Image: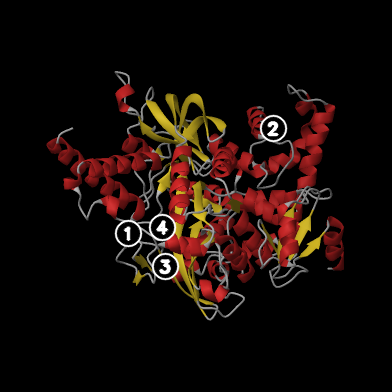
Amino acid sequence: MNIKEAMARVDGLRKEINKHSRAYHEFDKPMIADFEYDALMNELKELELEFPELDDPNSPTKRVGGEVLSIFKKVTHTIPLLSLDNAYNAEDLKAFDTRIRKELGEAPEYTVEYKIDGLTVALQYQLGKLTRGATRGDGITGEEVTHNVRTIKALPLVIDEPLDIEVRGEVFISKDNFLKLNEQQALLGKESFANPRNVAAGSLRQLDSKVASSRNLDVFIFDLISGVDSLNVTCQSEAFSKLNELGFKTASIEKFSKVDEIIAFTEKMVSVRHSLPYDIDGLVIKVNNFAQREALGYTAKSPRWAIAYKFPAELAKTVIREIQVQVGRTGVITPLAVFDPVVVAGSTISKATLHNQDYINEKDIRIGDTVLVQKAGDVIPAVVRVVLESRPENTENFVLPLKCPICETPTIRVDGEAALRCVNPVCPAKIQRLLMHFVSRTAMNIDGFGEALVEAFVEKGLIETIPDIYSLHEHTDELMSLEGFGEKSVKKLLDAIEESKSNDYYRLIVGLGIPLIGEKAAKTLAKHFPNMTLLRAANVEMLTAIDEIGEKMAKSLVNYFQNSESEVLIDRLMASGVNMTSSLVLADNGIFSGKTLVVTGTLVKYTRDEIKALIESNGGKAAGSVSAKTSYVVVGENAGSKADKAKQLGIVILTEDDFEALLNQS
């Protein structure tokens, strides 16, 4: 390549990288996968090294991060929040270790931490109180988001000692909460979020803190920006322990003295990371000792004592064979790509939602296309892009139907929504989806009553609406005539249906499929309106007086209960003996009021769902990790590291018998 060709390529790369960088950092809408972005950046770095005359101080290779949105107050960081150099393989890690050993003249100890895929924040505490939260921005200037970080329940607003410190953390959303949030988006007919990182970034940039609060954000603290001396720590592992003591939540940390051990750990984590409840896109390797870090120093862009190991890209190539059209329980028409099965992120996938017509048009997806697929956030299968050079001839643009594919009612698209909808209230597909939702685990949890049975019973005319489920005992002979059903299996199903009548009525609220009302909202409602009569009588003003219930949710509830069909449905359920009262209590009542409990190990007397429900119904919070804020740790067999950490922190450990004894006291 001559200088003229290099100049043209460098100019093109810089423009393309800046475009993608802005999409990712400023608008939280990445246009390409991380590995594709890294490939562009690496190519630019190599060309700038090969042709030093093309070096430019404004090149993206010289810049740490993104831009600051003008709608937020700008914050100049007390100490620049630098980015990290990347490692992609064992050779990169060995080269990093060789350089460190050479510069220090000795073998260091390393820490390895999870690289949480979220949004970095700097958090200032004065006299132990949170005074400011800011995004990283470009590393020098960020955006003040104090009003939103205050809504993160895992973040202490006041730490246990009156210290002046500043910490750095990563705000994220768990995989479970990400799935629930996208379910809510679907109910609203809105576009699904692409990945958990987008949710975290977008939530922190909301002007209304209620929006951030509703997203169930979480945070891991991973660094001390200032205040090392006041904490009296000399290394990263000590800092993590001290941060835990102060009430901060930190991610997993490991210590290694040999690079081969680090390499083995990275190889292990490539598959293990999929089992974590949150997203990590790599690991961060740091020199543990702070004095050695000072000796190694910094470049203009990054610390010389740390490196980020990026996991290999999890993309797979496949061919779309069909685009199916589904009708959801709220009438939303959703296209679904069906493709040749491929293994991605540890499991086989063969389908991915295409969300809506806008999504299909934007990516120009057609039947017969070769596409790259991934699991967004290691959870949701997604089509990343079409491999256009492999497109067969004579493919056609895909257009969603103008009529519902089930009942043929004309579909509509409401202004401001991305989704098409079937508005027929008695559309069989909507009714069937609602029935599936009602019997599901998150709703009435009727054991053995899966989608296949719902389909079979609807087809045979045994059930048409939700209350019909509780009349199935009147059709025992017809049930036993179905393929695969005998006397025992019919009895088992009918017993499970009968048992579901005694569920706490928050499960019924979930099962009714009221738009915008999921499990969390249903529990909140059941605590404030402990029976169905009170809830049905509530107006918008009464509902919005509850912090967790917004105006749209309140209107959705009122509209549902004012509907004559809903009134008949609930009256029929009541007549069938379905429980309409709640045993849930407000947080200021109950034996575990204001306390946080962690459950670990294999339980004998309870399932995880059962013990979580007991904790919450008695005023407590069921958490997943142990910290200084934990009140009790309930241990089963093979309790492991969480029990060990509880002992180190002096937290009360309960056996299942101890837990039961506390409940009996209450």
Q: Secondary structure at mark 3?
A: strand
Identify the residue at the far left of this view: 4
Q: Amino acid at mark 1?
A: Ala
Residue at which label 4 appears:
303
Q: Which mark lies nearer to you, 1 or 2? A: 1
In this view of the protein, which residue sits in the foreground, 619 or 48?
48
In three-dimensional space, the C-alpha distance between marks 2 and 3, rounded to whole angstroms, equals 58 Å
Residue under numbered circle 3 = 134
Q: Taking 68 as reference, is 496 above or below it?
A: above
- Nearer to me, 269 or 378: 269
> How many residues crowd mark 4 within 10 Å: few (<14), some (14–19), many (20+)?
some
Q: Position of residue 231 (x, y in %)?
A: 57, 73
Q: Are marks 1 and 4 in contact (CB under 8 Å)?
A: no
SS category of the residue bearing label 4: loop
Q: Quadrant of residue 322?
A: top left
Mark 1 burial class by Cα count in 10 Å: few <14, some 14-19, many 20+: few
Residue at 52% x, 41% y: name it. Answer: 378
Real-space Cα distance between discs 3 and 1?
A: 21 Å
Tell me the tag on residue 300. Answer: 1
Contact check, label 4 and label 2, Cβ < 8 Å: no
Q: Nearer the viewer, mark 4 or mark 3?
A: 4
Q: Position of residue 337 (x, y in %)?
A: 45, 30
Which residue is depicted at the point 39% across and 32% down? 401
Mark closest to the chain's N terminus, 4 or 3:
3
Closer to viewer: mark 4 or mark 2: 4
Q: Secondary structure at mark 1?
A: loop
Q: Is residue 457 above or below residue 207?
A: above
**Residue 413, image x and y in percent?**
38, 44
Residue ID at (60%, 64%): 238
Label 2, on which residue?
A: 462
Between circles 2 and 3, the one closer to the viewer is 3
Label 3 Cα neighbours within 10 Å, binned few <14 / some 14-19 / many ≥20: many
